[in-house]
Image (tube, helix red, strand yellow):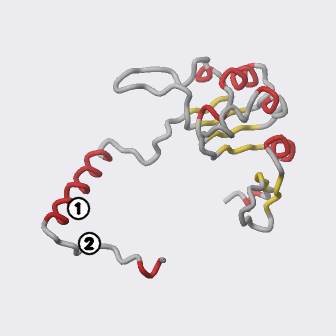
């Protein structure tokens, strides 16, 4: 979608197939060197947790970081410091460090990220509506009832996709 704006694209080479016009780099350090906007869309695991640490964030002067992967991929304290000190131009995220339990209210971070002018936060539930859980549960119950009745009229034929 951004090609029409003349953007160049780079990604860490994970030995997959990429479009020809995507620049492949070896690691996060190389990625931040060639990028003005870095989008994190990675799962949280032992190799990604804290990958965007103080050393990496210090290389993001005048750059933007967008995290739609998991909060803990970015070191929380280093992120706050980089944003507060102006080392990082801006940060947008729909993933947090703190999540409320049940009806508990809490801030997304242990640091006042939400108070900074160069931060945009939203929740990580773009597909959720007020009725989502009810609709999913009703659909599940309907499917289970049909299976109980041996009614397979809604069965998908996926053979053409395999």
- Is residue 105 shown left or right of residue 72? left
- Which residue shows up at 40% across the image and 76% down it? 158
The residue pinned by badge 2 equals: 154
- Report, in whole angstroms, how far the alpha carbon at label 1 lies from the one at label 2: 9 Å
Identity of the residue furthest to the top in this view? 111
Identity of the residue furthest to the left in this view? 149
Question: Which disc is residue 143 wearing?
Answer: 1
- Which residue shows up at 74% across the image and 56% down it? 14
- Which residue shows up at 72% across the image and 35% down it? 51
For label 2, the crowd category at 10 Å Cα-Cα, with few meaning under 14, some 14 to 19 and many 20 or more, is few
- Is residue 75 shown left or right of residue 98? right
- The residue nearer to you, when weighing 152 against 23, is 152
- The residue nearer to you, when weighing 111 against 150, is 150
- Which residue shows up at 45% across the image and 82% down it? 160
| Label 1: which secondary element | helix
Q: Please state the horizontal and vertical placement of residue 48, each as a whole percent of the image.
A: 67, 39
Q: Please state the horizontal and vertical placement of residue 125, each as a whole percent of the image.
A: 46, 42
């Amino acid at each position: 979608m951004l090609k029409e704006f003349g953007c160049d694209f780079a990604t860490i080479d994970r030995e997959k197939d990429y479009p020809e016009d995507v620049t492949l780099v070896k690691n996060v350090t190389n990625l931040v060197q060639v990028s003005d906007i870095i989008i994190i869309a990675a799962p949280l695991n032992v190799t990604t947790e804290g990958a965007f640490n103080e050393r990496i964030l210090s290389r993001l002067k005048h750059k933007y970081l967008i995290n739609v992967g998991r909060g803990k991929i970015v070191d929380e304290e280093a992120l706050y410091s980089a944003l507060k000190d102006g080392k990082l131009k801006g940060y947008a995220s729909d993933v947090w460090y703190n999540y409320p339990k049940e009806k508990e209210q809490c801030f997304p971070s242990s640091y006042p990220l939400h108070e900074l002018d160069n931060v945009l936060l939203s929740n990580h539930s773009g597909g959720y509506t007020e009725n989502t859980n009810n609709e999913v549960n009703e659909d599940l119950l309907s499917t289970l009832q049909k299976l109980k009745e041996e009614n397979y009229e809604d069965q998908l034929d996926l053979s053409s996709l395999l």
